[in-house]
Image (cartoon, coloured by chain):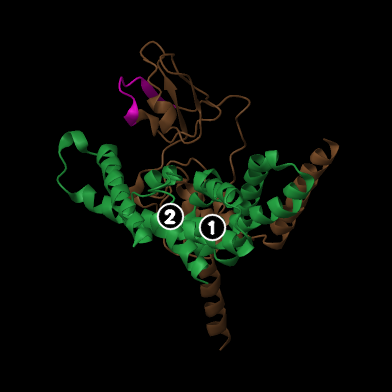
Chain colours: A brown, B green
Amino acid sequence: MLATILAIATLAIIFGLILGFAAIRFKVEGDPIVDKIDAVLPQTQCGQCTYPGCRPYAEAIANGEAQINQCPPGGEAVIHELADLLGVDPLPLNEEHGEHTEKTVVYIDEQICIGCTLCIQACPVDAIAGAAKLMHTVIEDECTGCDLCIPVCPVDCIYVKPVTETINTWKWPLPEVNQPTLKDLLDLKHIKQEQQS
Amino acid sequence: MAEYALILISTILVNNFVLVKFLGLCPFMGVSRKLETAIGMGLATAFVLTLSSICSYLVNEYLLAPLGIEYLRTITFILVIAVVVQFTEMMVHKTSPMLYQVLGIFLPLITTNCAVLGVALLNVQTEHGFIESALYGFGASVGFSLVLVLFAAMRERIDAADVPDPFRGASIALITAGLMSMAFMGFAGLVKG
C-alpha cells in the first residue's frame, strides 16, 4: 500500500519536474512590441477594428498589416500614443470603423428584460450578470461601452448612457501640449543644416 | 520484419481505431469541418499517440509491473498522456510557432482523445514489446489521421452538395461516417486473402 502511494507520487513528481524543466527550457518570449501596443489600446474588445479583439489588432499593427487609426473607442489619444510608440505620423481616425464618442456604458431596462441571456453571450468582458428567465443587469464598472449587446437584444431593452462623472471618477484634465513628432524634429534638423551651409 | 509490417497495416486499415474500433470519435466528428484543421489535428495526434504509447509502455513495464500495481494502470496512463501532451505543446510552441498557431486549441484537446488512452491500454492487453508498442501507436495515429483527412474532405464537398433538408448538418455527417466505416470493414478481407 505504502509502496504504491510512494511509486505513484514519485512518478507524479518526476513528471512535474520534467514539465517544470520544459517550461523553463522552452520558454517563449512574446513579442515585446505587441505587449506595448496592447497596453496602449483601450481593451474594450469591441472588434470595431475588424480584428477579434485588442490583442489581435496589436499583433496586426506590429506585423504592419493594420493602420494605427482603426480604433474608434481609443480615438485621437490612442492614435497619438501609437504614433509616438511606433515612430510614425499620426493619422486621422478612419471613419469606416466608426466615430469616436465619449465613454458610455449600457444599462438594461429590467422591466422589459425577458432573461434570454443573448446579451450575456455577446458581452466580450462578462459585464452582464443574470441567468436564463431571470432579469439581467449590467455591472457598470466592468462595462467597456462596446455596444455589442444592443443588436442581439430581442426586446430592445438595452440603452446607452454616458458615464457621469462622480467624485470618485473625476480626474484632472491633461494639459494640452503639442508634442513634436519625429517628422517635425527631422524638418528642424534640415532647416538648421541649411542655415549653417 | 513481416510482423511489424503486419502491425502497421492492421492498425492503419483493418483495425482502424476510428472506423472499426470506434475510438476517438469526438475529434473525428468535431474537427472534420475543414480540411486544414483536420490535417493539423492529424499531425498533432500522430505525434502524441506515438510518444504516449512509448511512454506508457515504459511506465507499465518498469514501474507498474514490478510493483504489482497494474490495477492503477488507467489513472497512471491518463497522467502520462496529460504530461506528454503538455510537453508537446511547450516544445512545439518553442520550436515552430507556425505549427503552434495552426494547431491552436487542438493541441491540448488531444488529452481527452480516447484513442490515445485506448492505444496505451490495448498495448498492455495484447502484451506488446517496446518496438511493437511504438509501431502500434504510430500505426493507430496514421490510421486516425488518414480517416480524419478523408472525412474532412468529404464533409467539405457535402457542404456544397444539395442535401435534402432533414439530412442537413450532423445527420448527413453521421451517415457518411457510417458508410465510411462500412467501407473500412471491407479491409478485413485482406487478412484472409
From the viewer's perspective, is residue B72 above or below residue B137?
above
Residue nearest the viewer, comparing A86 with B5: B5
From the viewer's perspective, is residue A93 above or below residue A136?
below
Picture disc at residue B137: 1
Crowding at mark 2 (Cα within 10 Å: few <14, some 14-19, many 20+): many
Q: Where is residue B130 in the image (x, y as percent from the top left)?
A: 63, 62
Instruction: Mark 1 or mark 2: name the one nearer the start of the chain.
Output: 1
Q: Where is residue B69 in the image (x, y as percent from the top left)?
A: 74, 41
Farthest front residue? B192
Q: Name the residue: 54% across, 50% down.
A: B119
Which secondary structure, mark 2? helix
* Residue segment shown in magenta: A151-161
Q: Does the magenta stretch include residue A11?
A: no
Picture disc at residue B144: 2
Q: Where is residue A191 in the image (x, y as percent from the top left)?
A: 52, 78
From the viewer's perspective, is residue B5 above or below residue A136?
below
Q: Name the residue: 51% across, 74% down.
A: A187
Farthest bottom residue? A197
Residue nearest the viewer, comparing A193 with B27: B27
Q: Position of residue B38 (x, y in %)?
A: 39, 55
Q: Name the residue: 62% across, 61% down.
A: B91
